[in-house]
């Protein structure tokens, strides 16, 4: 008999962990008291309010979520607002249950409904496979990318991807004795879709499209992505990495490529909770594909999910207010960067992501070092990571962080 369970809004008995807000009594222990103490200890004044972020940046020095006061860390594309308060509350409400294996039973169903694919939920057992699932959840999208590489890339095959690009799968290809095939970007850091398609051969195991691109921030709209997917032979997997898609300026573009999955058995779409949902430290990502693909990559995955991470992710999906605020913060931050860079005469690449690429036309190793050592500002070195000479990648942070970066940049450039 199948373990498949259709989505339901009613509670089901026998789950391996309580839902957020449920309590299991313990002698001498008050869950409510624990939560109040934990929130106070975290400095989360009026935690239920979305003004918490503003309260954290008062005082003489910049203070971002999750970093020491005075440190401006805008190099890793983390969410400057931090996680959803609902996600944090979900974690705290379950922290005394970490002696148990488990996962949130509703997460698969929520993700399936979000992307319009058939709904199949987890079984009561945290170790049981989920037949016919169109969603796979892992410890960050990198966990799933690693499994995808193992499932599809073999010695003697090829992996096609843009250059520069995120490069996770093509790095894996090198380790697997497969051949990475890198296709240079077009002018304006746009992906060369025709070039990617032309690079496909009988040996191609996978074609990778990252949209928006990392580190470029350039979006591949569905009007271009759909015909591109249809140009790829069905024997080759098309991986669409959408880690930053929720930051696209046009809301319609945020829907992404999951709509392609139903009609294209060779398409898999990956997303993450690390960026717009502000949960990089929890390591939750997911993939959308037809069940045959999900089952195939599942053979190459361990059970890396945790009780806390899956409940946090489920709660974050419900917090549309925090999602909107995160998107607006990034959009405002990018506009501020554009205005300042225009005034300074610095070239940049307008971005559909949470960061901006900036052309310093100088020794960026020295620039990045001085920003770090003299001003406590961390930015991404595009030369060191992607071999893009003269460029840095800067995350849109809190307004105070963005202003601190621009002020520090001006000081370093003036004294160079």
Image: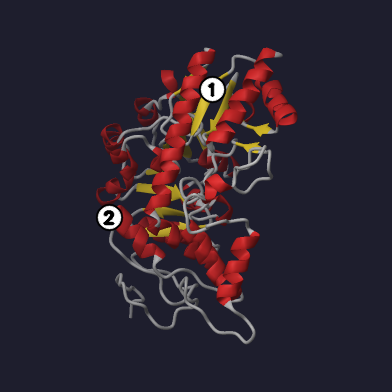
* Residue holding disc 1: 358
The way the protein has been coloured in the rendering is: secondary structure
Q: Mark 2 and mark 1 in contact (Cβ < 8 Å)?
A: no
User: SS for tag 2?
Assistant: loop
Determine the residue positioned at 52% across, 36% down. 166
Q: Which one is earlier in the sequence, the residue at label 1 or at label 2?
A: 2
Determine the residue positioned at 49% across, 53% down. 144
Residue 102 versus residue 327 in the image, above or below = below
User: SS for tag 1?
Assistant: strand
Q: Where is residue 45 in the image (x, y as percent from the top left)?
A: 57, 56
Q: Can residue 242 be seen in this view?
A: no
Q: Is 59 in front, or is 335?
A: 59
Q: Distance between the residues labelled 1 and 2?
A: 37 Å
Q: In which quarter of the image is residue 383?
A: top right
Disc number lying in front (1 or 2): 1
Q: Quadrant of residue 255?
A: top left
Q: Is 217 in front, or is 386?
A: 217
Label 1 environment density (alpha carbons within 10 Å; few <14, some 14–19, many ≥20): many
* Residue holding disc 2: 116
Determine the residue positioned at 32% across, 48% down. 258
- Quadrant including the C terminus: top right
Determine the residue positioned at 30% across, 64% down. 119
């Amino acid at each position: 008999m199948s373990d498949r369970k259709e989505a339901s809004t009613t509670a089901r008995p026998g789950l391996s962990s309580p839902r957020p807000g449920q309590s299991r009594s313990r002698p001498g222990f008050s869950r409510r008291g624990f939560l109040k103490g934990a929130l106070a200890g975290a400095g989360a004044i009026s935690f239920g309010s979305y003004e918490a972020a503003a309260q954290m940046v008062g005082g003489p020095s910049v203070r971002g979520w999750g970093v020491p006061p005075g440190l401006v860390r805008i190099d890793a594309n983390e969410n400057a607002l931090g996680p959803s308060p609902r996600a944090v509350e979900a974690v705290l409400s379950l922290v005394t249950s970490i002696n148990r294996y488990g996962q949130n039973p509703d997460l698969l169903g929520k993700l399936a409904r979000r992307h319009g694919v058939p709904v199949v939920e987890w079984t009561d057992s945290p170790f049981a496979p989920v037949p016919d699932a169109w969603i796979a959840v892992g410890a960050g999208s990198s966990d799933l990318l690693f499994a995808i590489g193992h499932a599809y890339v073999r010695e003697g095959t090829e992996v096609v991807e843009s250059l520069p690009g995120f490069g996770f799968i093509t790095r894996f290809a090198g380790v697997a004795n497969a051949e990475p095939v890198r296709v240079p970007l077009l002018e304006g850091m746009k992906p060369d879709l025709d070039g990617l398609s032309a690079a496909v051969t009988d040996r191609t195991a996978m074609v990778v499209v990252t949209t928006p691109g990392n580190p470029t921030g350039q979006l591949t709209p569905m009007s271009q992505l759909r015909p591109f997917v249809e140009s790829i032979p069905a024997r080759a997997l098309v991986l669409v990495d959408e880690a930053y898609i929720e930051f696209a300026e046009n809301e319609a573009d945020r829907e992404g490529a999951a709509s392609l999955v139903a009609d294209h058995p060779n398409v898999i779409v990956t997303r993450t909770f690390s960026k717009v949902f502000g949960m990089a430290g929890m390591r939750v990502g997911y993939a959308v594909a037809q069940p045959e693909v999900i089952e195939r990559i599942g053979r190459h995955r361990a059970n890396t999910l945790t009780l806390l991470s899956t409940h946090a992710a489920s709660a974050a999906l419900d917090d549309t207010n925090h999602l909107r605020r995160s998107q607006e913060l990034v959009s405002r931050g990018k506009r501020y960067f554009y205005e300042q860079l225009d005034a300074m005469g610095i070239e940049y690449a307008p971005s559909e992501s949470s960061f901006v690429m900036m052309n310093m036309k100088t020794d960026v190793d020295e620039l990045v070092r001085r920003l770090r050592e003299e001003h406590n500002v961390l930015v991404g070195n595009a030369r060191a990571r992607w071999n893009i000479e003269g460029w840095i990648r800067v995350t849109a942070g809190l307004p105070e962080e963005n202003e601190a970066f621009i002020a520090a940049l001006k000081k370093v450039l003036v004294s160079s």
